[in-house]
Amino acid sequence: MWKDIQQLQQGMSSALSSSSSVLQTRQKMLLATAQLQNSLGTQDLGRVYFEPIKDKLGNVLILTVKELPPSQTLENVRWSALSKLQRSVSPLKESTALDLLFATIKEKLAYHRRSSQHLPPGLYLGYLKLCSSVDQIKVLVPQKLPNVLCHTKLRDNKNVSREEWVWLQRQTSPSDSVGSGEHTGSPQCPFLKGLCTGVKSLLKQLDVPLWQARDFRLYTQQLLEFGKEVSFLLLLPPSDDVCSAPGQDGQLSGFLTLPLQIFEHIHFCTYEQDLLAQYCQASILLELDSLLSQQALREAIDNCELVKAKEKHGQVTDLIQVSEWRAGEPLSHSD
């Protein structure tokens, strides 16, 4: 989307005199982005860090992270060692947003690298756990690989055979298969053993006693596919525990909770980058059209203008509704 900044600025040219604070903020953000691109001599500013840095002085710092190959250079830029930046912390009692950035820059770089990594090819067992607060839903992810759900690898072959899938759909919970010798000698025996081992490994990571597995469920509506080389089976906690309140389950070592929208973004950046780029482009343009059509509604001075503005706004609203993720739609799935 960085290459579309100029196009977005042109699209907002009709709103330059708008009194809308939302449109004015959009204009200022686009202008600041264009100025940064020009000063660095590059369009691609990298990935936006998932949360802004705020200080007590009211400053907000939006951070983008991009790693450059040694052969690439940027105009009007000189490099500085991280240690030197971290020593340049302000002497003020109240830390500024830049101070907070310098103090945590290594952690942010580590997060960027981890969130860009791909899983090795194979079939995995993932665990879906959400945390809900008043204004957002967060998802539990591994610190070392925050672009996928908590997981354990079952095997190198990502495909699930028809026989394995039929057998899987007959199971009501992991406890139906864990510790059972009923299928010994059947074609599904290796798959069963791998699944049993995976359930035990995943529960151990999550510090969940094995006896609680009888209340867990396997999601068998679809096999989730992430890109062309990775597929996931999902392990779900009891329906009442899928989404918990903040702090209810304590803090698990080696895991973090990400806002669901941020998780979706870094997941698609890694596994479906082209799809995400197209969706974001359409979403941004539709949002801009929506803001402009709302402005036209407010500024209509006669019935003719009002009818046209209502028609335009209705068309844009319909397109926005069509483009939204369908409720309950998995992040990615097989056909």
Image (cartoon, grey):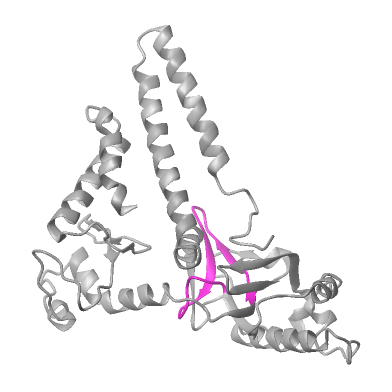
The residue that appears at 85% across and 80% down in the rendered structure is 176
**Picture coordinates of residue 122 (x, y %)?**
61, 80
Above-or-below relation of 253 to 42? below
**Picture coordinates of residue 55 (x, y %)?**
24, 61
User: Which range of residues does the magenta coloring cover?
Assistant: 125-149
Residue 141 part of the magenta segment:
yes
Question: Quarter-wise, where is residue 210 in the image?
Answer: bottom right
**Picture coordinates of residue 322 (x, y %)?**
57, 39
Q: Is residue 245 left or right of residue 91?
A: right
The residue that appears at 63% across and 73% down in the rendered structure is 231
Above-or-below relation of 15 to 279? above
Q: Is residue 124 left or right of residue 33?
A: right
Question: Quarter-wise, where is residue 172 in the image?
Answer: bottom right
Q: Quadrant of the C terminus?
A: bottom right
Residue 95 appears in view = no
Above-or-below relation of 178 to 256? below
Residue 325 part of the magenta segment:
no
The residue nearer to you, when weighing 188 against 210, is: 188
